[in-house]
Amino acid sequence: MLKIWSMKKEQEKAENAGEGTTAPAPKKKRVTAAQLRVQRDLAELSLGNTMTTEFPDPDNILSFILYIEPDEGMYKGGRFSFSFNVTPAFPHEPPKVLCREKIYHPNIDTEGKVCLNILREDWKPVLNLNAVIVGLQFLFLEPNASDPLNKEAADDLRNNRDGFKRNVRQAMAGGTVRGETYQRVLV
């Protein structure tokens, strides 16, 4: 919360600095509600040692990458990255989240779209980025075959859990599963 207030004070100071001078001070961009909320959400994140964030453009906190390295479950040993794009309508709209790797998962399709209820119909403005990140992490611990984007992976998980585990390992190693070639994500 302190960062938000100090950011606002700096903004006011910059606006007032131009008063009384002959040349107008350059206008500083106003901080949007979405930026303030994202800043607060990011300050409250507790990522632990299995996740990290990266900001390709340090001036744009509305677009960042989350890396997840599961330390348990079927996806243990992999490194997965998700692009987060937060719209100006945040928190009234959920962030847009895409998996950047092609992976074999019932809740992530081969184009990277993520099937997570809080990114769709169950989103509420009281939810924050931490809720989304925890949801993504949970998808690696407990893939959900009852709400799939990748129906073949969901069928494997439902009907042949051991076969599904083998397919996950093969896909994570950069192999081919059911005619689809996947990216190597093992670290």
Image: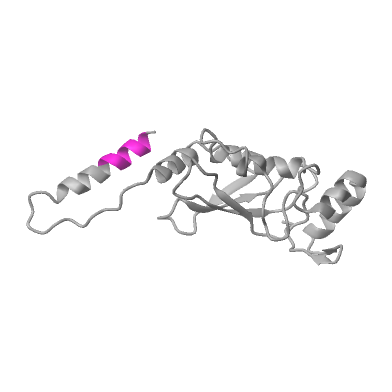
Query: Residue 78: image x %, image y %?
Result: 73, 53
First to last magenta residue range? 2-9
Q: Please tell me which residue lies in front, 50 or 119.
A: 119
Q: Main secondary structure of the magenta part?
A: helix
Q: Please tell me which residue lies in front, 69 or 165.
A: 165
Q: How is the image coloured?
A: one colour
Does any portion of residue 71 appear in the rendered image? no
Q: Residue at x 49, y 59 (%)?
A: 56
Does any portion of residue 171 appear in the rendered image? yes
Farthest-out residue, front:
121
In the drawing, does residue 118 fall left or right of residue 55?
right
- In the rendered image, the quadrant that contains the C terminus is bottom right
Whether 4 is among the magenta residues is: yes
Image quadrant assignment for residue 119: top right
Whether 83 is among the magenta residues is: no
- In the rendered image, the quadrant that contains the N terminus is top left
In the drawing, does residue 123 fall left or right of residue 44?
right
In the drawing, does residue 58 fall left or right of residue 135?
left
Q: Residue at x 53, y 37 (%)?
A: 128
In the drawing, does residue 19 fall left or right of residue 134?
left
Q: Residue at x 88, y 50 (%)?
A: 156
Q: Residue at x 91, y 51 (%)?
A: 163
Count of marks, rendered view: 0
Query: Residue 109: image x %, image y %?
Result: 73, 56
Query: Residue 105: image x %, image y %?
Result: 77, 52
Query: Residue 99: image x %, image y %?
Result: 65, 55
